[in-house]
Amino acid sequence: MPSGVNCKDAVACILLRNHRARAYTSMAQVLGLGGIRGECHHPALPFAVCSFKAATWTKAATKKELEAADGGRMVVELNGTKVLLATVDDEVYAVSNKCSHLGLPLVGKTGLLQAKISDKCVVCPAHGTSFDLATGDVKGEWCPKLPNLPLVGKGPKEAPLPTFESRVGENGEIEVLM
């Protein structure tokens, strides 16, 4: 596989939010490149996919470690990305630990930044938005803890939380597609 795919070489586009987005396996299937991920940072080309790298399954933790963690959730760093692992009803979910609103950690080092898991959603401790653990979609009101200010509203517009595909092996190892 080539080390990168140029924007001009891509036959299909993906919808990018805020001129940055991750391309997931579906994009790889469209391009016939196998499992890939990429990011676009080009402000002049908000719908272009600029570079890709092969996505690989990365060991994150064991199911036993996750179940023993505080509230069935833990943060791991995988390939430079902080990922929040959560288990609900024996399913393992992997989402970005960085909230899509202001980029604050969902689970941080202080007592104030401790996201709750409720109804298969992770609830941002800073502004109260609930994100579906499986899809990253916003469930309910966007930023219910924040006031709706004149001219700026509640800050950046509604955006889903990035999610990652995860799996549990026969030996209980949790892997995340990164």
Image (spheres, rainbow, N blue to C red):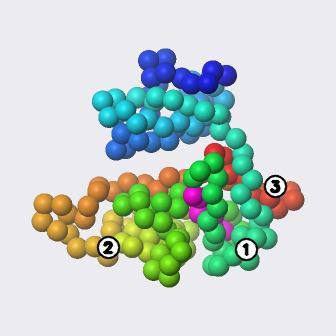
- Label 1: state its secondary structure: helix
Q: Main secondary structure of the magenta part?
A: strand
- Label 3: state its secondary structure: loop
Q: Residue furthest bottom?
A: 111
> Which residue carries the number 2 mark?
144
The reply to whether discs 2 and 3 touch (Cβ–Cβ < 8 Å) is: no
- The alpha-carbon separation of the residues under discs 1 and 2 comes to 30 Å
Residue for point 53% across, 61% down? 97
| Image vertical order of residue 23 relative to residue 7, above or below | below
128 with respect to 22 (left or right) = left
Quadrant position of the N terminus in the picture: top right
The residue segment tinted magenta is 82-88
Q: Amino acid at mark 3?
A: Gly
| Image vertical order of residue 36 relative to residue 133, above or below | above
Q: Residue 133's spot in the image, x, y percent?
A: 55, 62
Quadrant position of the C terminus in the picture: top right
> Which residue carries the number 1 mark?
67
Q: Is residue 2 magenta?
A: no
| N-terminal-most mark, 3 or 1 | 1
Q: Residue 164's spot in the image, x, y percent?
A: 59, 51
Looking at the rendering, which quadrant does residue 3 occupy? Answer: top right
Looking at the rendering, which quadrant does residue 139 occupy? Answer: bottom left
31 with respect to 159 (left or right) = right
